Image (tube, rainbow, N blue to C red):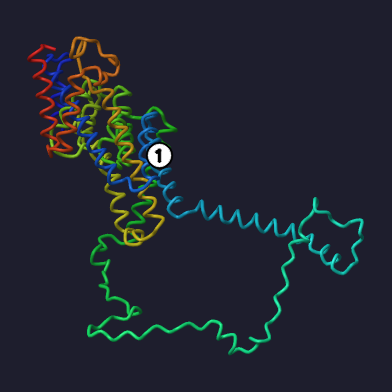
Amino acid sequence: MYGLSVGISRVGETLPKPVYALLAGLNAATVGIIAMAAVNLASRAITDKITRILVFLGGGLGMLYTALWYYPVIMVAAGLTTMVWDLRWLQIIGRHVGDLWKSIRERSSSTRRPRLVEVENGTMDHTSWPTSSTSTYLTNKPLPSPPRNSEASTLTDLNQCYLRPRPAPVPLSKFAIMPATTPLPTAEVDTASVFPALISTGIGSVLLVIFTLTFLAIILIRALLPHLPRAYSLFSSLYLAGTILFGGGPVVIPLLREYIVSPGWVSPRDFLLGLAIIQSFPGPNFNFAVYLGALATKGTSIPSFIGGSLAFVAMFTPGMVVTLGFLGLWRRLQNKDWFQATIRGINAAAVGLVFTAVYKLWEIGLVGGEGGVDGLRATNAGSGGAPLGGDPWLVFITAAAFVGGKWFSINAPTAILLGGVAGVGRWAVFKR
C-alpha cells in the first residue's frame, strides 16, 4: 500500500479515459461485493423481529449523518435496546406498575370497609344509606357455606365420593426401562480447556481501562485544540475510526473519506483511485489506511513512510487492545445474559452500517475527468465522484458482481477484476 501511494502521488491530474473506465468498473463491482457481504451478514445477525428492526435502523440512521462519534452511539443504543428487550425489563417494570396501581386501589377501597360494619350492626343512620347508584360494595358479600350433609359426615363416607376404579396392572417388559426420575448421563465440558486463559482477567481489565482513557483523551484534545500538527490529527482521526470497526472495513471507508479528504490532506481523486485499486487485491480493507497516511503527509516535513506507519498503528491498535482485553474477561462474560444480549444488538447495528457503506460508496463510485467517463459532467464533481446510477452499464456491473458472488461462488478479487474488464470493454466498443 505504501508503494501504491508513492505511485499515485506522481500521477498527473488528468488520466486517460480508459483508466477512468477501468476505475469506474472496479468501483461498481466493489459496491456489488460489499452489498453481497451485507446481505450475508444480515442473514446471520437477524434472529428475531428486534434484530431485524435494528439492522434497518442502523442502515437508515447511518445514511443520514456521518461523524466519528455518531456510529458508536448507534451501536451502543442498539446494544442497550436488545439488553432491555431480552431481559424483559419493560415487562418487569410494567408488572411492578400494575401491582402498585392495584395496591393503591385496594388501599382506597379499604377505607370504606368500616361503613359495612356499621350497616351489619344496625348503627348506621338511614339518611346515609348508600343507594345502588352510589355504591355496590354491600351486594358483593360472599355467599354462606352450604349446610353439611349428615349422611356423609364421616371421613370414610366423604372419601367414598372420590373413589375411582384402579387401572389393570401392566405386565413387566423384558426390556429394562430407565426410571423417569433418573437423570440422563451428561458429559461435562471443561470451559478452561475450550477457552484457555491466554490473558488473565486483571490484565484484560487494565487493557480496557487504558484504551478507554486514551480514547477519551484523544477526543478531549481534538475538541479543545482545533489547530494541531498534521501528524497528530492524522493519528487521532484514524485511531478513533479504528475503534468502530464492527462489521468490517466497508463501515470505516465513508469515515475515512470524511476525515481524510474533507480537510484537504488527500484529493478526492486519489482517494477513489486507491479505493478502486485496493479492492481488487486480497487482504483487509484496513490496509487502505496506510495508503491514505502516506498521501496525507505529502507536502509536509513528515516523510511519507512515517505517515504510513502512523496510520497503520492508529488503525490497528484499538482493535488489538480491545480484543486482548476481552479475551481476559471472556470466560466471565460469555455466560452472562446481559452480555450476550448486548453483543446481539451491537452486531445487528453494525450490519446495518455495512448497508450504509454500500449507499455512500454508490454515491461516489463514478470516477471521471473533465466531463466524466461517459462525456457527462459528474453531478458531484466537487467531491471527485458521482453516483453509479447515472450509468446503466455500471449498474449492470454492480448487479453482476452481486449475483456472481452470492450464487456462483465467485471470490471478491475475481469479481472486482471482471468489473474493471467490463468497464474497459465498454469503452473499447463505444469509446465512452
**Which residue is the extreme one toward the front?**
151
Q: Is residue 341 visible?
A: yes
Residue at (29% x, 14% y) in the render? 379
| Picture quadrant where residue 283 is located | top left
Residue 265 vs 115, above or below: the answer is above
Question: Residue 195's spot in the image, x, y percent?
Answer: 25, 62
Q: Secondary structure at mark 1?
A: helix
Tell me, yes or no, if residue 306 can be seen here: no
Q: Which quadrant holds residue 364?
A: top left
Q: Residue at x 36, y 51 (%)?
A: 208
250 on left or right of 99: left
Which three-letter amino acid code belongs to the residue tagged 1? Answer: Ile
Nearer-the-camera pick, 243 or 3? 243
The residue depicted at 35 percent of the width and 49 percent of the height is 344
Q: Is residue 2 above or below residue 156?
A: above
Question: Dividing the image into 4 quarters, which one contains the C terminus?
Answer: top left
Front in this rendered view, residue 8 or 351: 351
Q: Position of residue 29 (x, y in %)?
A: 17, 28
Image spot of residue 117 (x, y percent): 83, 67
Viewer-closest of 393 and 199: 393
Residue under label 1: 74
